Amino acid sequence: MEKVDVIIVGGGLAGLSCAYELADSGMTVLVLERGDFSGSKNVTGGRIYLRPILPYLPDIWKNAPLERHVVKEIFTAMGKTNSTTFELYSDRFNQEPYPSYTILRAKFDRWFADLVMGKGGFVIPQKAVDDLIKENEKVIGVRSGDEEIGADCVVAADGILSFLTEKTGLRKSFQPQHFALGFKEMIRLDSKTIEDRFRLGEGEGAAQLFLGTLTQGMMGGGFLYTNKDSLSLGIVIGLESLNRREPREEIYKLLDQFKERPEIKNLVKGGEVVEYSAHLITEGGIHIMPKLYTDGMLVVGDAAGLGLNMLATVRGMEYAMVSGVLAARTIKRAKERNDFSASSLAEYEKLLNDSFILKEMNTFKNTLSVLENERLFTKYPQVISDLFEKVMWVDENPKEGIYKTKMAELKKAFFNIETLKDWWQFRKI
Amino acid sequence: MIKCKETKLPPPIIPSFHYSSIPSFHLGGSMKITEKLALDALKNDKETHILLDQKICHTCKERFCIYACPANLYSLNEKGEMVVEFAGCLECGTCMIACIYGSVKWKYPRSEFGVQYRFG
């Protein structure tokens, strides 16, 4: 059996970051990627926050193929026939180093893999790993088709459905309440039109989140990201919510219905749909993280359940990249000791705990229980727009005093036991 | 031959190495789901990567899979069996998790097969 120092299963952000950090360590590193190229099996909304990653990977960004840096954060509360939008523009977001960029994974990951190869790592595409090779419960290699490759250490970077963590008993079986389905269309639109429609300067971007009737009572929301010359338009739905929905309807129709709304129709007018994609997102947070290591193996990225719904935004790509780097550092030290046992690799968990990753996952550990409140997706977005609409409506009747009638509405909608309880829940995040 | 509920899926699309000639669909009327899938670069294996346990499906009333699959690949055939048109699979794994009865035996397609995203 051929043997290398490290096999990284999965050439996504976590796997490639691990390989990049290991590339000049003198160890032989193989990244095995099942897609035709890195990124071909990955999907994001999406947008990546650079600043948490910079301390760990400071040098890779100069020619990185990122899309637009986000200077506008837009939040839309959708009612059945109306919607209210809050839009933040910030000079602070518009200064280098820009805090976040929209990103396309098939483009970015592919480029990153080339970077890793340039640094001496080997990224082998079209190489799905079918099984682990174990010797007395210690992972000593992988099997891909008929080929067996041995390694001192295997890194499970095989994404959100991680079969490697299943095969090593590091995680429990998946439950619908811990996942959300994200599905989207890539809509090609020329950059000038994007900049005109979103009122952006050249190269600037917007990120928009939608909450309310678009998910028809289910937990989730919509998103729209501006890329260089395309839009990513999609919906995220909690799987348990999807399963419980009455009356039943195929989920793909939700995106078509969303696009029928004038608010969306006019934003994507004249665009060409060029891709349709779907991917799962972890919603369970810190509670459902698998064990992060075992004899001969470390777990990084989505495979380690490192993803977070922070309501105002979602996190995952930063966690993937930094966890890859931390895993690499752990492996380097394990190599010095020539000890790849669980107790040696346990340092990885300590590094994660000390980093922003687990600190944040801890801070937001109650997000799911807050999200389970269906009024977030039904009543509250509707009430906001209805109130605004009532204030702005003028017809042949004499307009009533704003304070008197609107306060009555507000009181009815928000000053009740139910809402006070909801507000109390919000303190958890 | 596994048949889809509505129109048959278009023949497998073998992408060239240059992804520049990307098919597209102008927004006007709404696209059918099969049309959206036809935009994607898909290389289809001869064998399915998704297996269903018909004994379990037979007792299922909810049919979670039909409603959860974003590619609309699940349907009941004339014999009342659950079938999945694996050729359009977006490889999200939703069906595997949505089926709480454990009928869906799911793994990724073999190397070189399945969807290859060009944007992601």
Image (cartoon, coloured by chain):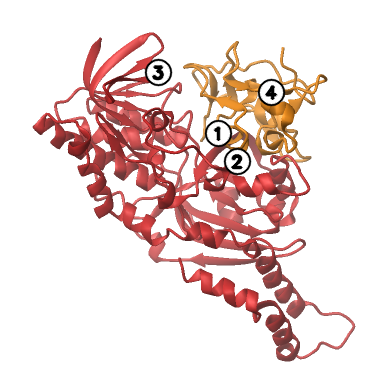
Please state, as top left, top right, bottom left or bottom right, where the C terminus of chain A lies in the image.
Answer: bottom left
Of labels 1 and 4, earlier in sequence is 4
Report the chain holding disc 1.
Answer: B
**Badge 1 and badge 2 in a common chain:** no
* Label of residue B92 in the image: 1
Find out whether the residues at labels 1 and 3 contact each other: C-beta distance under 8 Å: no
Judge the density around disc 2: few (<14), some (14-19), many (≥20) Cα neighbours within 10 Å.
Answer: many
Q: Is residue A200 above or below residue A272?
A: below
- Going by the picture, which residue comes out furthest to the right? A396
Q: Quadrant of residue A19?
A: top left
Give the red chain's letter: A
Of labels 2 and 3, earlier in sequence is 3
Report the chain holding disc 3.
Answer: A
Q: Is residue A237 above or below residue A5?
A: below
Identify the element where label 3 is drawn: loop
Q: Amino acid at mark 2?
A: Phe
| Pick the front one: A56 or A355 | A355
